[in-house]
Amino acid sequence: MVSEADPAPSHPLPGAIGLSHLSAYDWEAADGVCGGSPHLHLVCTEAYVVTGGRGAVQTLSPDGYRDIPLRPGSVAWFTPGTVHRMVQGGDLRITVLMQNGGLPEAGDAVFTFPPEVLADPDRYAAAATLPPGTGADTEAAARRRRDLAVEGYLALCAAMTAGDRGPYCAFQQAAARMVRARVPAWRELWRAGALAAAERTGAQLDALDSGDPAHLADATAYRSEPSRLGGFGMCGRRDEYALPGTTPPYDGEPAS
């Protein structure tokens, strides 16, 4: 956690991004592939910065199916609507940078569960939500969640590779319907986070343009360390940071 000797952070990370570290799951799925739970984001672009090991990220988007190799130094990112599945190839470790920090934890991530689960909000919530903590029960629930997401994903992938984008488009529509009621709350998070950060820059540029660098008098430095290690995220074991306006700690709330 943030050291008591350091200033209490009052500003988000640069650009109001979310930040976490992931070790990709090594659980084998029905197709023999080890990795995480396929999902998409509705309004957030996500980036992987590979810090160790090897693996891949599989994606489905209007440009088809892709298998993008990951190795140390690789950076891969995908825009809203892209279904992505992190694949473990050997000790894969990733730093995740998330646009609109806080929105993924507020529900801007929908698993590729089969259509009958997506059509039932209660059934979806029961499948997506994990017990609190990092114990054996949580791990078992995370694995069941991953397996159900892979089940739906494999059907989407088979259709896409056969030239049929219908199921993929239907999944996007179902995801959009599912989150619609959350949009007002997301808008407030965005205004307080990413939009506020951009507006601060605009105000600083206006001040410099007028010859008034008064905001520089508030210069300072911050530090933080993970607030929880080894949480069960969508893609793998997740180290989180409790920083204002960025990626809050979570218990049960779907997150990458």
Image: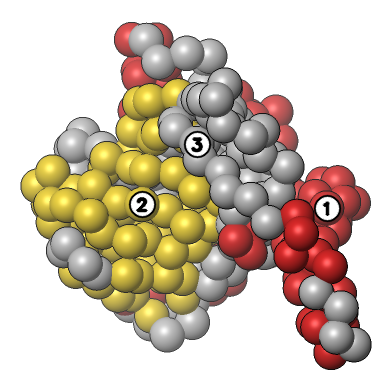
From mark 1 to mark 3, how far is it between C-alphas? Answer: 21 Å
Is residue 152 among the parts visible in the rendering? no
Which residue has dot 2 on it?
Answer: 95
Number of residues whose C-alpha sits closer than 10 Å to that of mark 3, classed few (under 14), some (14–19) or many (20 or more)? some
Q: Position of residue 246 (x, y in %)?
A: 63, 46
- Say what amino acid the circle numbered 1 marks: Ala
Question: Disc 2 residue type?
Answer: Thr
Task: Work out whether 153 lies above or below 231.
Answer: below
Instruction: Please give the label number shown on residue 77.
Output: none
Q: On the picture, is 125 further left or further right than 72?
A: right
Residue identifier under label 1: 192
Q: Tell us which disc is closer to us: 2 or 3.
A: 3
Disc 3, SS: loop
Q: Marks 2 and 1, Cα distance to the nearest angstrom? A: 24 Å
* Label annotation for residue 224: 3
Q: Is residue 130 left or right of residue 188?
A: left
Q: Quadrant of residue 233?
A: top left
Residue at image x 9%, y 47%?
90
Q: Quadrant of residue 35?
A: top left
Q: Residue at x 17, y 57 (%)?
A: 55
Q: Are marks 2 and 1 in contact (CB under 8 Å)?
A: no
Q: Regarding mark 2 in the picture, which secondary structure is present there?
A: strand
Q: Position of residue 104 (x, y in %)?
A: 62, 48
Q: Secondary structure at mark 1?
A: helix
Residue 253 appears in the figure: yes
Distance between mark 2 and mark 3 Cα atoms: 15 Å
Question: In the image as oriented, which residue stretches furthest toward the left?
Answer: 90
Of residues 10 and 167, the one drawn nearer to the viewer in this rendering: 10
Q: Nearer the viewer, mark 1 or mark 3?
A: 3
The residue lying toward the viewer, choosing from 211 and 80, is: 211
